[in-house]
Image: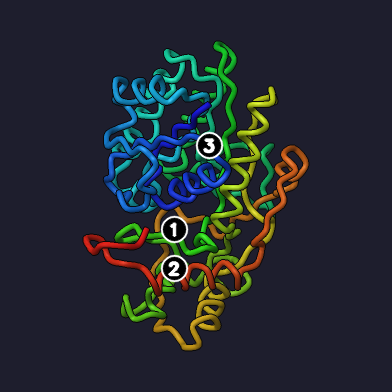
Amino acid sequence: MGVLVTGGAGYIGSHMVLALRDRGEAVVVVDDLSTGLRRAVPADVPLLEGSIDDAGLVGGAIASHGVDAVLHFAGSVVVPESVADPLAYYLNNTVRSRALIATCLAAGVPHFIFSSTAAVYGMPDIAQVSEAMPLAPISPYGASKMMTERMLADTALAHDLRYAALRYFNVAGADPQGRAGQSTAGATHLIKVASQVALGKRKMLTIFGSDYPTPDGTCVRDYIHVSDLVAAHLDALDHLRAGGACLVLNCGYGRGFSVREVVTAVERAAGRPLDVREGPRRPGDPPALVADAGAIRRTLGWKPAYDDLDTIVAHALAWERGLVPEGVKGGA
């Protein structure tokens, strides 16, 4: 059996490729390299450069590698960008996902795992959001992911396809062995940006909104270590292969940290203060978004290994220290 990872040259996808490879799975990657990096994919893992809506490319990869499961990470992920250019997000995240699902059906792939997001919940008014919450995205990013979830649900009812949609909260950190991390140019993730400021790669960090109805006025998020997120995908894959039912699950730890708390954690790890400025709110940002993570633990027996903000920050900072710029030989 083989596994096709779309977006496998990106941040989360590259960690997924390593985890699959570590346990002896046959892996093939499809990535258009618009944001991913070729060097993020191990040399012994086939990388096919192209779009997920290229049925010939994807279908050929499925056939030639005996693929029984597709893990779909290819997509656009920047909320403010989606507000500014919604059609690009509906094209990349929804239309192309529809094409990918159709190719999987035509090829007889039985298992599909989708990289969804907590942004499908919109702006909930409760402390923790469960999978039973109504979906009310407030950004095209969240809406584009919600549409793909709906396509998968409808497709699974009509065809022999079982899927898991995993709703990520805020993914951060890096591979504990230092093999992969967040390398995307112009990344907007808070811990990534704060680490760059701590190491002098950026001059300053902007807090977007300090007047939210939260304890310190800044946004609160549930940060999950990328390696724990990848472990959840492995658990979901095992569940589907064992004949388990379709799943929609939150991926988070169940507690949140504010932007200021994250900045303090990075300062603590780096041993120096950061140059922090305050700016206006960004469009599409809810004040707080924290997971009710009970279902994934009960259903999959998921046991996170890195549920600690200081550990997440330490791994992100270590990766950033050793990061080799694109175009320079080495790194991952």
Please give the residue where the numbered disc 1 appears in the rendered image. 180
Toward the bottom, the furthest residue is 272
Give the camera-side residue of 36 and 132: 36
Residue at 59% across, 41% down: 233
Residue 231: % across, % down: 61, 47
Q: Check if mark 1's residue and mark 3's residue have beta carbons within 8 Å.
A: no
Residue at 65% across, 31% down: 247
Residue 271: % across, % down: 50, 87
Real-space CA distance between mark 1 and mark 2, rounded to the nearest whole angstrom: 8 Å
Residue 107: % across, % down: 43, 15
Please give the residue where the numbered disc 2 appears in the rendered image. 319
Q: Can residue 157 be seen in this view?
A: yes
Of the numbered discs 2 and 3, the one sitting upstream in the chain is 3
Residue 73 image-quadrant placement = top left
Real-space CA distance between mark 2 and mark 3, rounded to the nearest whole angstrom: 25 Å
Horizontal placement of 93 versus 32: left or right? right
Residue 120: % across, % down: 53, 41
Q: Name the residue type under label 1.
A: Ala
Q: Name the residue type under label 3.
A: Glu
Q: Is residue 118 visible?
A: no
Q: Check if mark 1's residue and mark 2's residue have beta carbons within 8 Å.
A: yes
Disc number for residue 25 = 3
